[in-house]
């Protein structure tokens, strides 16, 4: 099953760093994943977050307003509801 990762943010340095950390975590866990960058403000607002960057995993907001370490993201991605291959 493919895990859908969405990075919400306008492309700022923190957004790019969150993208790097999320991809590294997913690769290290061996996840089959698809990455989407959501950069349009209107679409970001639809998620109801109050600060970017944000990480949405399979439709569920996991992180917003800061950039966790790759290790922390691995813990979030390996949690319930996220399948690894």
Image: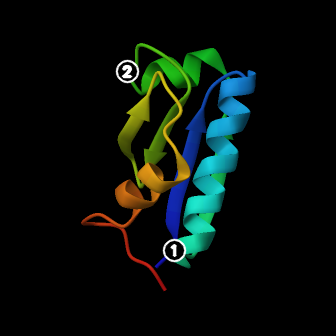
- The extreme bottom residue here reads 85
Please indicate whether residue 9 sits to the left or right of residue 76 in the image.
right
Image x and y of residue 6, in percent: 56, 45
Image x and y of residue 5, in percent: 54, 53
Please indicate whether residue 57 sits to the left or right of residue 6 in the image.
left
Q: Is residue 59 above or below residue 84?
A: above
10 Å neighbourhood of mark 1: few (<14), some, or many (≥20)? some
Q: Is residue 30 above or below residue 16?
A: below
Tag 1 residue: 29
- The structure residue drawn at horizontal position 75% and vertical position 25%, both measured from the top left corner, is 13
Between marks 2 and 1, how big is the CA–CA gap? 28 Å
Image x and y of residue 35, in percent: 64, 55
Q: Nearer the viewer, residue 61 or 27?
A: 27
How is the protein colored in the picture?
rainbow
Q: Quadrant of residue 12?
A: top right
- The extreme left residue here reads 80
Secondary structure, mark 2, is: loop
Please indicate whether residue 41 sits to the left or right of residue 10 in the image.
left
10 Å neighbourhood of mark 2: few (<14), some, or many (≥20)? few
- The structure residue drawn at horizontal position 42% and vertical position 27%, both measured from the top left corner, is 47
Image x and y of residue 19, in percent: 66, 44
Q: Is residue 27 above or below residue 55?
A: below
Tag 2 residue: 48
Q: Nearer the viewer, residue 78 or 36?
A: 78
**Label of residue 53 in the image:** none
Give the mark nearest the N terminus, 2 or 1. Answer: 1
- The structure residue drawn at horizontal position 49% and vertical position 26%, both measured from the top left corner, is 66
Secondary structure, mark 1, is: helix
Q: Quadrant of residue 18?
A: top right
């Amino acid at each position: 099953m493919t895990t859908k990762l969405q990075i919400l943010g306008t492309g700022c340095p923190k957004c790019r760093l969150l993208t790097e950390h999320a991809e590294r975590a997913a690769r290290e866990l061996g996840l089959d994943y698809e990455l989407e960058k959501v950069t349009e403000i209107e679409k970001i607002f639809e998620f109801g977050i109050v600060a970017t960057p944000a990480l949405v995993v399979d439709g569920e907001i996991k992180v917003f307003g800061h950039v966790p370490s790759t290790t922390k993201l691995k813990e979030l991605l390996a949690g319930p509801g996220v399948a690894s291959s």
